[in-house]
Amino acid sequence: MMAANTVPLLPRLVSSSVAIANHAGKIIRDVLNKGDLQIVQKEHVKDLQTEADRAAQRCIIGSLTKHFPGLIIIGEEEESSGPVQLTEQSSVVPLKFTCPPHLAKLSQEQIVVWVDPLDGTSEFTEATAAAAHKCLMGNHDTGCGAHSTSLLDHVTVLIGIAVDGKTVAGIIHQPYFNYKNKEKELGRTIYGIIGSAGENDGVVGGLLVKPPPTGCVVATTRSHASSTVNDAVSSCDPTEVLRVGGAGHKVLLLLDGSAHAYVFASPGCKKWDTCAPQAVLEAAGGALTDIKGDHILYHRHVQHRNSEGVLATAPGQDHAAYIRKIPAHVKENLVK
Ligand SMILES: Nc1ncnc2c1ncn2[C@@H]1O[C@H](COP(=O)(O)O)[C@@H](O)[C@H]1OP(=O)(O)O
Ligand SMILES: [Mg+2]
Ligand SMILES: [Mg+2]
Ligand SMILES: [Mg+2]
């Protein structure tokens, strides 16, 4: 086994981030178990923050800073006070991939880490409200409770790593994966480095399944829809539309064969929503761009908003063909 200091910076950062994302997932579950989300509204009624978002971000940024002093990290949430749980330097996962040669000699100044401590906050709060309602009703199935608790699948922790403005590696942790099946391990982490040779073509931790050769299943927003969003989805002639929460969750649907494309013609997604999912998807052979087909950049001083929307396609899909289908009025509506 290689000594830690001979392992290049990028694999060390990915390995540490996997352990940190797993810990952040545990923090999220602990907050939900305690039942007091302490919800704060940010810019609008569908833009919420909970103690789980805040505590998970404190853990991620605090741990990364402790292990990689001086690292540039941009998190979704503003700094908050409260207990900070840090991971140990030793809590790194064994590497299951090789570092691509062109990323083997990075200096820390080239790197920006984009952190979304809890993606799918709307769904997280709704699931929690439904579960509480179910409890109040004596744990009977109230209909809404049974349906809405499945919203916990939409929650992910996202850590994306960009080098010289391009995303190169991503970690997607799904804290409630398997929560309905008590026999199985709770939570899963999928991560990848673009161009690395690892298990499953550079993506570790998830089953990669291509979507069916016929049909067109489009995943889109559940809680941030608009007429432009709907026009873009319709233009793809979908055989099925999955209205689900979270950017990380929708990219997981592209990786497990559940959807062909993820279409979001809205400026609502930010760089921390797409940096990690894009890297994992592209490591697997898929693509994620803005709605016009242009690359999304992740430099330190880039604007946070993905103002020209998001379009992602599963491995094996014709990404350019989807871009061509998006109507001109939708593209014109989304400007820098
Ligand atoms: N209008 C918006 N305001 C705030 N966040 C948004 C908006 N639209 C999308 N997002 C973020 O992008 C993610 C994916 O969008 P959607 O779930 O609507 O498909 C959301 O979970 C949310 O991230 P977060 O939950 O981390 O705040
Ligand atoms: Mg948010
Ligand atoms: Mg998000
Ligand atoms: Mg978030």
Image: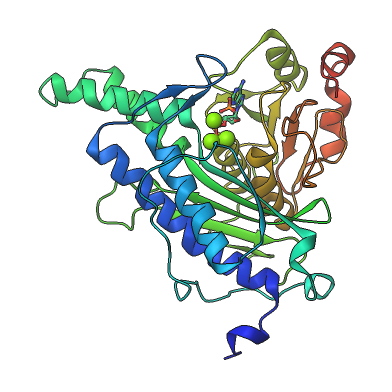
- Rendered location of residue 214, percent (x, y): 69, 35
Residue 85 locus on image (x, y percent): 38, 56
Q: Is residue 319 above or below residue 199?
A: above
Q: Is residue 233 left or right of residue 257?
A: right
Q: Nearer the viewer, residue 283 or 57?
A: 57
Nearest to the observer: residue 81 or residue 183 = 81
Residue 301 in the image: x percent, y percent?
Answer: 79, 42
Q: Quadrant of ligand 3?
A: top right
Q: What residue is shown at x 68% (from left), y 33% (from top)?
A: 270
Instruction: Using the rendered image of the protein, determine whether residue 180 is visible from the camera's viewpoint.
Output: no
Q: Is residue 121 visible?
A: yes
The residue positioned 64% from the left and 41% from the top of the image is: 272
Q: Is residue 107 above or below residue 59?
A: below
Q: Is residue 115 left or right of residue 184?
A: right
Q: Quadrant of the C terminus?
A: top right
Tell me the residue at 65%/28% (across/down).
Answer: 218
- Residue most extreme to the top: 227
> Is 304 above or below relative to 95?
above
Looking at the picture, the colour scheme in use is rainbow
Q: Which of these two is toward me, 216 or 119?
A: 119
Instruction: Spot the residue most to the left.
Output: 138
Q: Position of residue 316 (x, y in %)?
A: 76, 48
Judge from the rendering whether residue 317 lies leftward or rightward of residue 202; answer left or right: right
The quarter of the displayed image where residue 265 is located: top right
Count of numbered badges drawn on the protein: 0
Vertical order, 218 against 280 (above or below)? above
Q: Residue at 38% of width from left, 25% of height from top?
A: 39
Q: Quadrant of the N terminus?
A: bottom right
